[in-house]
Image (cartoon, coloured by chain):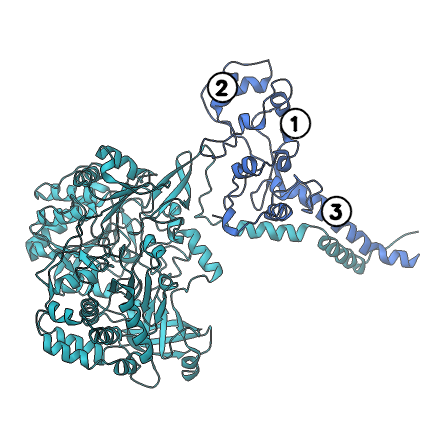
Chain colours: A blue, B cyan
Amino acid sequence: MSRLRSILPPLLGLLLGLAAGWAAFPYLLYEHEAQPLSFSHAAHAGETLGLGCEDCHGFEPDGTFIGVPPIEQCAACHEETIGDSADEAILVRDYVQPRREVPWRVYSREPDNAYFPHVVHVREAGIICERCHGEHGATSTLRPFERNRVSGYSRDIWGKRISGIATVASDGKKMSDCLRCHATEDVAASCQDCHR
Amino acid sequence: MTTTWTRRDALMVMGGSAVGLMLSPLPWKLLDDVAIRTQNHPWAVPAPRGRRTSRLTRCSLCPAGCALRVRSVNGRPFALAPVPGDLASRGTACALGLGAAQLAYHPDRLTVPVRRLGPAWMTARVPVAPTGAVHLVSGWLRETQRAAGPEAVAVLDGWPGRERSLRYRRFLASVGGGTYIAAPDEGAFLARFSGLLDPHPGPLGADLEHASAVLSFGTPPLLPMSAAERGLTLIHAGPRRPAQAALADQWLPIRPGTEATLALALAFLLLETPGSGMLANLVAAEREPLLALLARFTPEAAAAITGLAPAAIGQAAMRLRAAGPAVALAGIDAAAGPLAPGDEIAIALLGVALGSVGRVGGILPRAGLPGASEDLERVAIRDLPAVPDGSIHLLLLDGADPGLALPWSLVATKLAPGARVVSFAPYLSGMATRADLIVPAPAPLEGLAEIPGSPVLAQAALGVAAPLLSPPPGCREPGDFLAAVAAATGLPEIEAAPVESRLRRRVEAIHRAGRGTVIRAGGGEASELSALSSSADLWDLLLAGGRWSDAPDPPPRLHSALRLPPGSLALLAAAAGGGAGQRPARPREVLLVPIGIRGAVGTGSLPPALAKLCRESDLWPAAGDAFVHPDTASALRLRDGREAVLVTTAGSGRARVRIDRGAMPGVAFVAIGPGAAEFGATPGAREESLLRLCVPAAAGSWRVAPATLREV
């Protein structure tokens, strides 16, 4: 009994430390920011409309990745409200009609010191979007954007798991993830390829 | 059962918690995030979000004018990259050029005119309204004209040969004959060479497009990429091999200050060969004494002075002889500046011995840019040393940063007591810190900029950098400012046309001349200029990153002979036989040789990201680093990394000892830049460069100074 009593305090401390590091720390580290509007990728990319990823997130003729589509592209269909959702009304009133860009929080934005050429990976290497972005194209709502309070990066860069150990290939967009993929695919990479 | 918690239990809980935390990602992840956060300095402007575009342009920081791909978001440039397809730069660009997108946001950037409060030693400055700045300079101009005449008004141009330079000269002409001073640059040697020829052939250039070998004393010029691809032989002579000479075919590590000796020894060897009658044909005066002087510089005699092996001198002469058209050039070092006049005369003589004067692949007359030479004879171009001491009452400093050091002491001796200094620099850095008034010019990428080719090359060239950012409202093109000053002072009107229309006129003149070739930055072969149907097409091509290069056909002829001015032989003999450097005079003395990288020697501002990279990586030597050979360190009891006091006749300063096997024994190579400010210290808190310890000679050379180095 006295032996159990003696290990109880350090055990309790250990559990507290583990809980703080594994559960409380991630909660405190990331601040949650709501997206300005709800958006259903599934409604656009699914069978209803049949759009592909590149129909909105395409490339300029010179290969520059468009990323978030400009409001003009939304306006092509949403010049008038479609349906009666509140977000649709906000989209048309606040963004489409005044031709103001929607300030989307981009989950996968690479840091300023890194350059990721989408065109090389998508067009030349033939990598499918899901390889890095998972099932994002099938989601019916946009999850909150999680910003690291210290570094300012999106949580998607580090990955969903705070340990940084990915269980699926699309989890994490750290430099080590890029290097791992390049090693797996046997594609050489130098510092200046991305940091230029 | 009751349990009592003791202080020991609390400590055990804390210990367990610490272990638990260490077994969690918290410390490691936090460390990673903090490391990222510390990399985000306040100057680092976050890349804007929005529509990304890219376009081609040319770098306007130096005459190389490398092609750059500019990536912008919402029209704002945030990243620059070299362009592999460009025929002129072949996908290369230096670190300064790649960071140029940040220069507009530099912490030292000025956005409105500022005036210094009080005397020269005060650093406090107050903003001045643009019109107030015009009236201030107008008042100083009237005062100078009245008190000392128009010659006392001077412009020191950092990059002669631009449209902006023409406006400076027009302004000085309207003043009634002011003094136009060209800062020393790569073209200084060829200008002096031209002065030694009779009849005077006008501007000269080296035909490096067709040369087979280049012997460079000091930092080599920017070689055309095509020359490097042809397999041009580059021989570098100097006490230290700069980065530009890293790929030289041969390095002749001569003692500091012995350039003239080596040049005369090589000339001696070349004249011993068949065909050396060329010298007799090309030297117009003092031929016999000159030959007698040359005869003194056998390889053995020169070896004793330069520190080279006689065989190395012979090998270099053989290479030059065998190579075909060869050119000997006196380069300008970023930190150590130009060679002394005696050295330059010796190198000119070597050029004559090489038979390079007037020969394709040698030294040829330089046609210059069409439309650039209008009637400006009233305001001649002068070298700084040629300006009488204490003669300048109002000095206008051009804001262009040539990337080369210029000791302030050399400028200061030309100023009269109480002289006013006005700077057009975009930053509060370098010589602008000495100015009474700074009227900031647009920073790189902010204004339409012309990029004339290297003044060393026989073929003129022109590129144009399109404006990619709007300058702040308080910034002003120097020519426009001077036009306003002229109007306020009642001087004859200076053309007030905007930069674009003046540059367009120059492009029209080039198109009218109809010669030369053009290249597109995006790639493809060079095409004849005549293939472009209008000057508007040429303008559009240049704005899209293209480049025009002159190609006179047939090549201009040169029928001049060397005529050494009186006193030249004495200068030659002094430079070659008992010059300033060579060896320390006293046992515990070293020779101080300033070193630095072009663009980072404290005359301008480094891109902040580059400064950060250098600071954190020790990539470049920092100002104050003194590199000494282990034997020298041992003799002077110096230890690596320790602070030492460097003393010359000009004063003393602190240096950090860096023991370097590559350094020449008996020499302290002292880095004069980049300084702490360029490396990201508090803006304005600039330490004085150790360049002040190098005493400029009357002829404007500051390459070597005897010094003592003692550890503190």
Which residue is identified by label 1?
A: A139
| Residue B533 appears left or right of A78 | left
- Which marked residue is nearer to the observer: mark 1 or mark 3? 1
Q: Which mark is residue A19?
A: 3
Q: How crowded is mark 2: few (under 14 residues within 10 Å), some or many (20 or more)?
A: some
| Residue B111 appears left or right of A99 | left
The chain that hosts pointer 3 is: A
Q: Quadrant of residue B520?
A: top left
Choose the circle earlier in sequence order: 1 or 3.
3
Choose the circle earlier in sequence order: 3 or 2.
3
- Which marked residue is nearer to the observer: mark 3 or mark 2? 2
- Residue type indicated by callout 3: Ala
Choose between A97 and B241: the one closer to the eye.
Answer: B241
* Residue at horizontal 26 percent and vertical 33 percent from the top: B537
Q: Horizontal and vertical percent for residue B567?
A: 10, 74
The chain that hosts pointer 2 is: A
Residues tagged by mark 3 and mark 2 found on one chain of the structure: yes
Residues tagged by mark 2 and mark 1 found on one chain of the structure: yes
Which residue is identified by label 2?
A: A75
Q: Horizontal and vertical percent for residue A93?
A: 50, 18
* Residue at horizontal 23 percent and vertical 42 percent from the top: B130
Q: Is residue B415 visible?
A: no
The count of marks equals 3
Q: Horizontal and vertical percent for residue B97?
A: 37, 50
Kindly check if marks 3 and 2 are in contact, taking CB atoms under 8 A apart as contact: no
Kindly check if marks 1 and 3 are in contact, taking CB atoms under 8 A apart as contact: no
Q: Is residue A181 above or below residue B221?
A: above
